[in-house]
Amino acid sequence: MRIALAALLLVLCGCAVTTDIRLVVEGSGTADQLTYTFPGEEERTLKNPDVPWQRVSARKGRVLVRLEGVRGELTCKIIINGRQVKTATSTSGAALSCDHSMAV
């Protein structure tokens, strides 16, 4: 009941709720290249990124993290408002990616 009342108050007052979007890569492996995208931003590519790696945004839309040239074990995660919505792990050396789309 309290949650419903709080949501109603947010709608009535016109207050916006901020979305916390986290892209995370962790593990004991390495990657030759890490590419990531947040809505409304240019795709970015990092060569030989340090792991663990993390970036944060608040824009809704499609988010993506992709790793190429993976050696060892790496895991990518997409976490929205503290809830993990996507995860993938690679130990084979194959490319690894996590992507998720949110309504705008």
Image: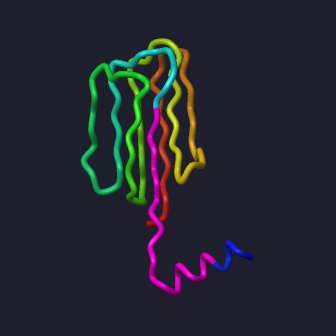
Q: Residue at x 41, y 35 (%)?
A: 54
User: What stretch of residues is rendered in magenta?
Assistant: 6-24
- Image height of 100 relative to 19, above or below: above
Residue 55 is situated, as x and y percent measured from the top left of the image, at: 38, 40
Residue 26 is situated, as x and y percent measured from the top left of the image, at: 49, 26
Name the image quarter holding residue 67. top left
Residue at the farthest bottom position: 12
Please state which of residues 8 and 35 is positioned toward the viewer in this rendering.
8
Q: How is the image coloured?
A: rainbow
Question: In the shown orientation, is residue 36 left or right of residue 78?
Answer: left
- Image height of 79 relative to 24, above or below: below
Please state which of residues 7 and 102 is positioned toward the viewer in this rendering.
7
Please state which of residues 20 and 99 is positioned toward the viewer in this rendering.
20
Residue 79 is situated, as x and y percent measured from the top left of the image, at: 53, 45
* Quadrant location, the N terminus: bottom right
Residue at the farthest top position: 72
Numbered disc total: 0
Q: Is residue 40 magenta?
A: no
Q: Residue at x 48, y 44 (%)?
A: 99
Question: In the shown orientation, is residue 6 left or right of residue 53?
Answer: right
Question: In the shown orientation, is residue 8 left or right of residue 40?
Answer: right
- Image height of 47 relative to 61, above or below: above
- Image height of 87 relative to 26, above or below: below
Q: Residue at x 27, y 51 (%)?
A: 41
Name the image quarter holding residue 52. top left
* Quadrant location, the C terminus: bottom left
Residue 46 is situated, as x and y percent measured from the top left of the image, at: 28, 28
